[in-house]
Image (cartoon, rainbow, N blue to C red):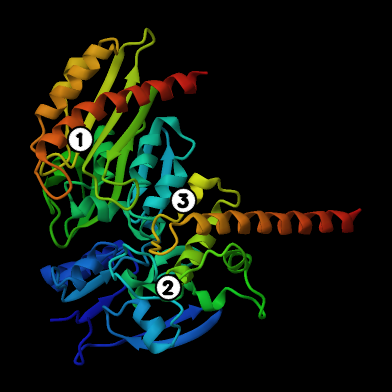
Amino acid sequence: MSVQGFHIPQDVAETVALAARLGSEAYFIAGGTDLVIQMRRGRRKPGHLISLQALDGLKQIESGAGLVSLGALVTHKQIETAFAADPVLYGLVESAQVVGGNQVRHAGTIGGNICNASPAADLLPQLLTLDAEVVLTGGNGPRQAKLADFLLGPGRTTRSADELLTHIRFRRPAGKAATAFLKAGRRRAMEISVISVAACIGLSPDGRLEDVRLAVGAAAPMAYRAHDAEILLQGHKPDEDRLSRAGILAASAAVPISDVRASAEHRRRLVAALLPRAIRQCLLRIEKAAQ
Amino acid sequence: MSQHSVTRYPVSLQINGERYDVDVAPDTSLLDVLRDEFGLTGTKANCLEAECGVCTVLLDGKAVNACITLALQCQGRQILTIEGLAHGGELHPLQTAFIECGAVQCGYCIPGMILTAKSLLDTQPDPDEAAIREGLAGTLCRCTGYQKIVDAVAHAARQMNQQQSQIKTTTTGDRQ
């Protein structure tokens, strides 16, 4: 069966009403960088496409009063550009810029990356470290959820078919803080992550790890926060021994698969090696920003 | 992807500065419309999965893969294909640079490569080699090993920046 209808609603209310009327065979389409490929492969067969192209209000990044709000239609390229000179949120730039080529980053959106809920989605680990929240609008009005609770598993979220993800929000880390994201792939461009790690670090005035938030991608059915590693580091000075023990703890929480890209064992080793590196990168950024 | 019984929707596309009207199925790609409806075959078709970049066109000035862009998503937006890059018979500096640097072998990736490069230079007029390589990463060439392509983009950037500074000097001169 091919697509019967193409709809271009003009606002969020109309979008949600359309989705409710058309039911589960209707798919939202934003950048289409995943959906169109899946349609061509015959893996997704939408009866209707509801295009979000006219929802200009969801294409903005707003940053003020310590709160950052990203519209769900913000592209990867917009994220790269918006935070390019921002050491505190530079990890988001690193997350966005490893997705596909420029062509895909010009079209693919943060909302699509989140709702697709791929275990290897590159934006998820850093957003998890930022304690991001998602805002959805459905027939019963808007609701908020923690990103960590919103993501259920590969391709699964708590979003119902007639709910539209409209915004992603998080509090900007305050004080001496920085973020960093590292990805291991088989090559440096156009590659699905073998492993990704993200860190968001806040330092106390005397140089202790005051705020430690760590996440790992592509190492389990869903990107996860490495809580044990966070607890190990919290309140301590960042010495090498403790950092590598944190890496090992984060790796022990992984349930990686073996596939054509890497073995499960290799993925665990990569987590243990990369997580300390991401933390050191944050420390370096904090140091540089203070100069 | 389309079948005969499918509803078709009218769409008005601005391609290379001209308006084109066409009725398309919901899942018709921009690539298919360019090539099959309008005969603009400079935009190439290959992987159809946004991996290779030979179908790259500029949508509102930004490089995108036409193979995974639906035609109906382009309503009212500006599309630039390789056919629209030269002006009044004069090649764009990128086109000239690709010829001068011998950056073209089989040529199949070149329309996409040039438009990918244009999108890069429009936002980053003076990229270093790493930035050029990163900027072109979404477009694959299976002939050249990329060195001459990177050389050509760097050469074009220098030419365009020189032209730009000449224009500035001229306008400043006029005012004095």
Type of amino acid at the residue the image marks with label 3: Arg
Query: Which residue is situated farthest in the bottom direction here?
Result: B4
Q: Which residue is drawn at 47% across and 69% down?
A: B105
Horizontal arrangement in the rendering, residue B39 relative to residue B27 (left or right): right
Label 3 packing within 10 angstroms: few (<14), some (14-19), many (20+)? some
Q: Distance between the residues labelled 2 and 3?
A: 19 Å
Type of amino acid at the residue the image marks with label 2: Tyr
Type of amino acid at the residue the image marks with label 1: Val
Label 1 packing within 10 angstroms: few (<14), some (14-19), many (20+)? many
Q: Is residue A266 above or below residue A212?
A: below
Q: Closer to the camera, A191 or A290?
A: A191
Q: How far apart are marks 2 and 1 (CA)?
A: 39 Å
Horizontal arrangement in the rendering, residue A58 relative to residue A42 (left or right): right
Give the structural element (helix, strand or loop) at label 2.
loop
Q: Identify the disc placed on residue B108.
A: 2
Q: Mark 3 points at which residue?
A: B133
Q: Which residue is drawn at 82% across and 58% down?
A: B171
| Chain hosting mark 3 | B
Q: Position of residue A255 (x, y in %)?
A: 8, 37
Looking at the image, is mark 2 or mark 1 nearer the viewer?
Answer: 2
Q: Distance between the residues labelled 3 and 1?
A: 28 Å
| Chain hosting mark 1 | A
Give the structural element (helix, strand or loop) at label 3.
helix
Horizontal arrangement in the rendering, residue A174 relative to residue A275 (left or right): right
Q: Where is residue B19 in the image (x, y as percent from the top left)?
A: 51, 84
Q: Identify the disc placed on residue A216.
A: 1
Horizontal arrangement in the rendering, residue A29 relative to residue B94 (left or right): left
Q: Which of marks 2 and 3 is nearer the N terminus?
A: 2
